Amino acid sequence: MSDAPRNWFVHAWRDWLRSVVFIVLAVTAFRSAVADWNDVPTGSMKPTILEGDRIVVNKLAYDLKIPYTRWQIAQWGDPARGDIIVLSSPADGRRLVKRVVGVPGDTIAMNRNRLVVNSKPVVYSPIDPELVVAFDPQGNHRVLASEELDGHSHAMMITPGARTLRSFEPIEVPDGQYFLMGDNRDESFDSRHFGLVDRGQIYGRALAVAGSVNPENHFWPRWSRFFTGLK
């Protein structure tokens, strides 16, 4: 390297390049180990999460990992039944957003879209009529209900007539494994298809919708969904 380029690099490093590198490392390390956002391209979690939502992911929800790796430094919790989590798909490594319906020690089954957890059918109840109209304006394509897991309720949706797996025999969830499903039961690629998910494949817990755009309306912002919590 000649003197001119070397001098330019030395001055640039002292004046601004060092600060830029530090900021980039700090931001990427924060996103890797503390908190991140995840854009949602599919409707597998409707009506809870919509296509075009950007969700906030708490990567400290269950443990602390070394930035840029999956090496765990400390652990203070595990995903609970009903949590919405972000994971690496066992099928192809893509990031997915799903709900935990089975934790280690559980026995999970499904009978005609009704979950059965540890031999007890999950409780379903009617949902807000306004939400039903929003997702099924014609009144004949979607069925929405409130599903209760461990005392916490969330909305779920099925699509009569869709070709999907609506029933399966009991599955025992071993240690370190989780059974995951999408709230949009008939249009979700989840543990019914790719199997149980290892604890190490879980990045963190989805906490809220930071922002949202509507892909079907020229990506116009859905202002009502900004800064809303997830449950």
Image (cartoon, helix red, strand yellow):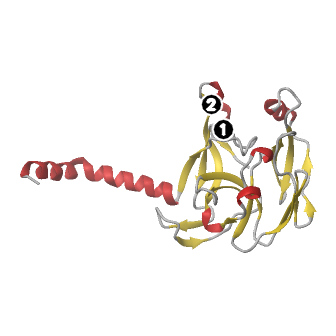
Q: Where is residue 49 in the image (x, y as percent from the top left)?
A: 70, 42
Q: Residue at x 54, y 54 (%)?
A: 35
Q: Which image quarter: residue 211?
A: top right
Q: Which image quarter: residue 195?
A: bottom right
- At mark 1, the secondary structure is loop
Tell me the amino acid under the disc marked 1.
Answer: Glu
Q: Where is residue 208 in the image (x, y as percent from the top left)?
A: 65, 46
Q: Earlier in the sequence, mark 2 or mark 1?
A: 1
Residue at the outermost bottom position: 175
Pick the quarter of the image with the N terminus.
bottom left
Residue topped by disc 2: 215
Residue topped by disc 1: 51
Q: In this view, does 207 lie above or below 225?
A: below
Q: Where is residue 106 in the image (x, y as percent from the top left)?
A: 81, 69
Q: Is residue 96 above or below residue 216?
A: below
Residue at the outermost front position: 163
Q: Where is residue 84 in the image (x, y as percent from the top left)?
A: 70, 54
Nearer to me, 98 or 205: 98
Residue at the outermost left position: 3
Q: Residue at x 17, y 51 (%)?
A: 9
- At mark 2, the secondary structure is helix
Tags 2 and 1 touching, CB below 8 Å: yes
Tell me the amino acid under the disc marked 2.
Answer: Pro
Neighbours of disc 1 within 10 Å: few (<14), some (14-19), many (20+): some
